[in-house]
Amino acid sequence: MPRLLRLALLVAVCTASLPLSAPVRAADCAGRLGTSRVMEVDPNGLEVGTKHFPQTLDLADREVVLTFDDGPLPATTPGVLKALSKECVRATFFVVGRNAAAHPDLVRREIAEGHTVGHHSMTHPMTLADMPYDKAIADIEKGLRADDRAAYGEAGVHPRVPFFRFPGFGSSPTLLDYMKQRGIGVFGADLWASDWNPMSPQEQLDLVMARLDHVGRGIILFHDTRGQTLKMLPDFFAALKEKGYRVVHIVPAPPRTAAAPAGN
Ligand SMILES: [Zn+2]
């Protein structure tokens, strides 16, 4: 069989459940943790993550969504990307606008490697809910534009990926209303590694796996800015594989087209 055809077939087999537009290093995926499915998420009115809201994504038992906040940072984000790539795992990065503006190459790499890039404000105030409303909105909007400019070279009125996570989960009813009006989905989390607390990678692994085994599924929050998280990732992926967890990759559902009026 011609080499190119053989390669094309391998890519087709390995990417059957992934978006066709996303590049994949096909042959490497065999025997890896992998990404079990891609979930299209409608951002309109979306508020998910049981640590923040009453409901979460529609995940089956042992399905997890991996999210990384606060990057990108040159010291740690490339290592996180390498670890994800090694296991053919796709994740969502909630990037901080000022970091995205400073390191657009890393944001572009996240996208080129098939990950989803969502938003996490411009300056990461702790928290947006504790600021005057207008200043909070300005920080959110500045972040959306900075992220899209870094990622795609331009920023429109509507972010290309309308996914947002409030720093420190610090939202308020009026800020949540604003996001709803903007058609931007809000992500909390179902569990986390508490990786903002200094601990060894092994301690962090034990902690996050105990929490995951307890709830059995969910959106997991990490920080790609934390060296201890980077060091933990290979063992974390091995533990997920060993225990039969499956990684779900989230992408925004295509924008709704205006529906024709029904029946009249
Ligand atoms: Zn954060």
Image: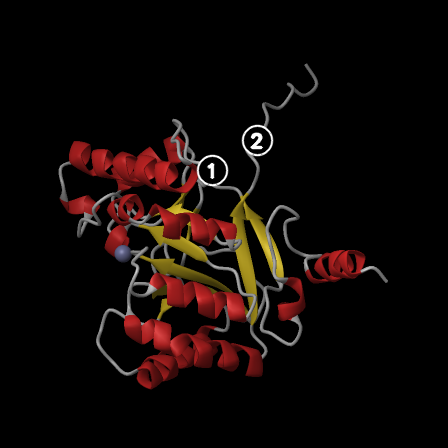
Q: CA distance from mark 1 to mark 2?
A: 10 Å
Q: Amino acid at mark 2?
A: Arg
Horizontal placement of 227 versus 10: left or right?
left
Say which residue appears at 49% left-offset and 54% top-offset. 115
Residue 119 position within the rendered picture, expressed as x and y whole percent measured from the top left: 35, 46
Horizontal placement of 258 versus 92: left or right?
right
Which numbered tag is attached to residue 256? 2
**Circle 1/circle 2 CB separation < 8 Å:** yes
Front residue of 239 and 6: 6
Task: Residue 259: tell me if it is visible.
Answer: yes
Quarter of the image with the C terminus in it: top right
Residue 71 position within the rendered picture, expressed as x and y whole percent measured from the top left: 31, 56
Lower sequence index among marks 1 and 2: 1
Front residue of 58 and 193: 193
Horizontal placement of 212 versus 147: left or right?
right
Some atom of ligand 1 lies within 8 Å of the CB belonging to the residue at label 2: no
Task: Residue 220: tell me if it is visible.
Answer: no
Quarter of the image with the N terminus in it: bottom right
Per the image, the residue denoted by label 1 is 44
Residue 110 position within the rendered picture, expressed as x and y whole percent measured from the top left: 44, 53
Residue 75 position within the rendered picture, expressed as x and y whole percent measured from the top left: 29, 64
Residue 210 image-quadrant placement = bottom left
Say which residue appears at 34% left-offset and 41% top-offset. 147
Q: Eyeballing the image, is 150 above or below 197? A: above
Some atom of ligand 1 lies within 8 Å of the CB belonging to the residue at label 1: no
Q: Secondary structure at mark 2?
A: loop
